[in-house]
Image: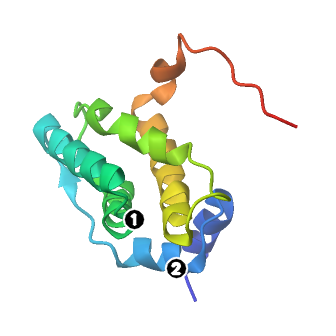
């Protein structure tokens, strides 16, 4: 069973047990330079475009656990993270639905670190279909 902090994270972000286990088992990396973020961005884009849910989930977990140094621009991988995070879990495969949840977790982290709101400053509000 996951420690209390992990259970809290799972509840807050609606993560499945397998996703929590994947996060717990993921090695923490440090992103010290913007070029490292750009490299991750390219890998995220490639995995997403290829529909490689396994690779995508691994990258999302790595970035969710990553220590991002102050001043490192995360903008390079924000777009793909948000594209995945805005996916519809219900119409996705189980593996891709997991990626959607992990991307939402990462998007929350990026928002806390670098204020993602700048992406939507000029966007029109979305209206949910009833």
62, 2: nearer the viewer: 62
The residue sitting at the top extreme is 122
Q: Which mark is residue 107?
A: none
Q: Quadrant of the N terminus?
A: bottom right
* Circle 1 SS class: helix
C-alpha distance separating marks 2 and 1: 14 Å
State the image coordinates of residue 19 (x, y, percent, origin top left): 50, 72
Mark 2 crowd level (few <14, some 14–19, many ≥20, 10 Å Cα)? few
Indicate which label's residue lies in the foreground, 2 or 1: 1
Residues at marks 2 and 1 touching, judged by CB atoms closer than 8 Å = no
Residue 96 screen position, x and y as percent: 50, 62
Can residue 117 be seen at all in this image of the molecule? yes
Residue 130's place in the image compared with 40, above or below, is above
Callout 1: few (<14), some (14-19), or many (20+) C-alpha neighbours within 10 Å? many
- Give the residue drawn at x 20%, y 44%: 42
Residue 61 vs 127, above or below: the answer is below
Q: Identify the residue shown where x is 22% and y is 34%.
A: 72
* x and y percentages locating residue 10 in the rendered image: 61, 67
Quarter residue 123 falls in? top right
Would you name the residue on which mark 2 appears?
18
- Figure quadrant of residue 130: top right
Left or right, 2 with respect to 70, comes to right
Question: From the viewer's perspective, is residue 106 above or below residue 78?
Answer: below
Q: Which residue is mark 1?
A: 53
Which one is earlier in the sequence, the residue at label 2 or at label 1?
2
- Residue 68 appears anywhere in the view: no
């Amino acid at each position: 069973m996951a420690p209390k902090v992990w259970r809290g994270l799972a509840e807050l972000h609606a993560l499945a047990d397998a996703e929590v286990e994947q996060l717990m088992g993921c090695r923490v990396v440090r992103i010290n330079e913007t070029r490292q973020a750009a490299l991750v961005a390219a890998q995220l884009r490639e995995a997403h475009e290829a529909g490689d849910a396994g690779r995508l989930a691994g990258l999302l977990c790595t970035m969710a656990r990553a220590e991002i140094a102050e001043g490192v621009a995360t903008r390079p991988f924000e777009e793909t993270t948000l594209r995945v995070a805005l996916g519809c879990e219900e119409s996705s495969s189980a593996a891709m639905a997991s990626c959607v949840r992990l991307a939402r977790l990462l998007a929350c982290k990026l928002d806390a670190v670098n204020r993602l709101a700048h992406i939507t400053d000029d966007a029109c509000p979305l209206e949910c279909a009833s």
